[in-house]
Image (spheres, rainbow, N blue to C red):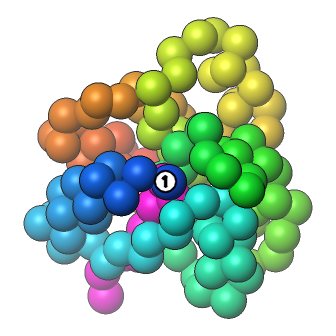
Amino acid sequence: MSKIIMTADDSASVRQMVAFTLKQQGYEVVEAVDGRDALTKLGTQKVDMLITDLNMPNLDGIGLIKGVRGGSLNRMIPIIMLTTESQDSRKAEGKAAGATGWIIKPFKPEQLIAVIKKVIG
């Protein structure tokens, strides 16, 4: 059975690029348009990993991570931040909230796949 990865990003083009990259590698993809949408879907859908943007409307990536870590169904999944933010202070904030890793946009598809394979296989 293939692994399921959720991608949460308010940019449709980024979601499409991530989904395309992941599907080519055999992963199933669940898309969310922002943190609130992601939390709603994660409340009922078990996933193997979450890839989230930092800056999103309604609920940002940090709020999403805190919500996931405070929940039950997907509390232990790896969470990768995929964002344009590269400041150490923002990375520290993400790590403190429970992020597993950080990838800077724009990303190379092979870089994203390498991180995923390292984290979930």
Residue 84's place in the image compared with 100, above or below, is above
User: Which image quarter is the N terminus in?
Assistant: bottom left
Residue furthest out toward the right:
70
Q: Which residues, given as a range, are shown in magenta?
A: 1-9
Q: Residue at x 45, y 39 (%)?
A: 82
Instruction: Check the picture and name the quadrant holding the C terminus.
Output: bottom left
**What x and y, as percent, mark residue 86?**
51, 16
In this rendering, position of residue 30 left or right of residue 19? right
Is residue 4 highlighted in magenta?
yes
- Residue with the most extreme top position: 88
Q: How many badges with numbers are in the image?
A: 1
Q: Is residue 113 left or right of residue 6?
A: left
Give the percent coordinates (x, y) of residue 91: 64, 22
Residue type at the position of mark 1: Asp
Q: Badge 1: few (under 14), some or many (20 or more) residues near its Cα, within 10 Å?
A: many
Residue 106 makes an appearance in the image: yes
Residue 96 shown left or right of residue 19 in the figure: right
Reply yes or no: does residue 5 show up in magenta: yes
The residue where tag 1 is placed is 9
Identity of the residue drawn at 66% across and 59% down: 35
Q: Residue at x 76, y 26 (%)?
A: 93
- 78 left or right of 40 in image: left
Residue 100 is drawn in which quadrant?
top right
Q: Is 41 drawn above or below residue 76 in the view shown?
A: below
Q: Nearer the viewer, residue 81 or 106?
A: 106
Instruction: Residue 22: tell me if it is visible.
Output: no
Which residue occupies 18% across, 43% down? Answer: 109
Work out whether 29 lies above or below 118.
below
